[in-house]
Amino acid sequence: MEHQPNRSRVELADDTANPAPLGLSAFGLTTILLNLHNAGLYPLDAMILAMGIFYGGLAQVLAGLMEWRKGNSFGTTAFTSYGFFWLSLGGIFVIPHLQWGVAPGPVAMAAYLGLWGVFTAILFVGTLKLGRGLQVVFLMLTVLFFLLALANMTGSGWVLRIAGLEGIACGAVAVYVGLAQLLNEVHGRRFLPV
């Protein structure tokens, strides 16, 4: 009989920061800015694109990687996926201007946004085991993606404006949840409900 070494497991204390406030704030603020455009308040410009690439995109990918370090599969999947969503959305606008590809038509954009809606609806099911704030964010985001898909499919300006208003609310809830988590941690108690 071969001798098996005695393997013991050492549990290390997790002293890393909570990445969720960063990820939720990056998602929420970027969502608000884009949907102010969708609501018709200003044109799509470099400000939205830069916010989408650097804060909505890169900051969320970093938050997702930090969630991976913490062993949080849901946080890793959500933040990393939506970070790359923002980066891909930026690419959809930039690539045609660089003449690296053709801009997608309305049906293609509806398919893109609709698939993100399906993905988000499935993640929403995962939030049923998490806090109420995250449930609201993911439910509102699911509705937002389907409204945006419908607006692209139909070309309806009023559906796009409704999506814009719903997206502003969705982003605001995400920012609230992220900052509530941060303030609760800073105060060491339930400072704001999540």
Image (cartoon, helix red, strand yellow):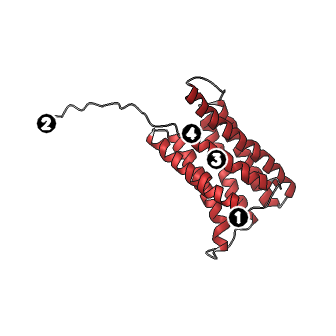
SS class, disc 4 = helix
Residue at 83% x, 52% y is 161
Residue carrying label 1: 108
Spot the residue most to the top: 189
Towards the viewer: 130 or 171: 171
What residue sits right under mark 2 in the picture? 2
Name which residue type carries label 2.
Glu
Query: Looking at the image, is mark 3 or mark 2 nearer the viewer?
Result: 3
Q: State yes or no: discs 3 and 2 in contact (Cβ < 8 Å).
A: no
Q: Residue furthest front?
A: 187
For residue 101, above or below residue 167: below
Query: Which residue is label 4 attached to?
Result: 20
Q: Is residue 63 left or right of residue 143?
A: left
**Element type at marker 3?**
helix
| Vertical position of residue 17 compared to residue 82: above or below | above
Badge 1 vs badge 4, beta-carbon distance below 8 Å: no
Q: Nearer the viewer, mark 1 or mark 2?
A: 1
Check disc 3 and give the amino acid type.
Answer: Phe
Q: Quadrant of the N terminus?
A: top left
Residue 184 shows in the view: yes
Using the image as rendered, state which of residue 55 and residue 95 is in the foreground.
55
Residue 140 visible in the picture: no
Which label lies toward us, 1 or 4?
A: 4
Q: Position of residue 191 (x, y in %)?
A: 63, 25
The local secondary structure at tag 2 comes to loop
Labelled disc at residue 27: 3
- CA gap between label 1 and label 3 equals 23 Å
Quadrant of the rendered image containing residue 13: top left
Q: Amino acid at mark 1?
A: Ala
In this rendered view, identify the residue nearer to me: 170 or 143.
170
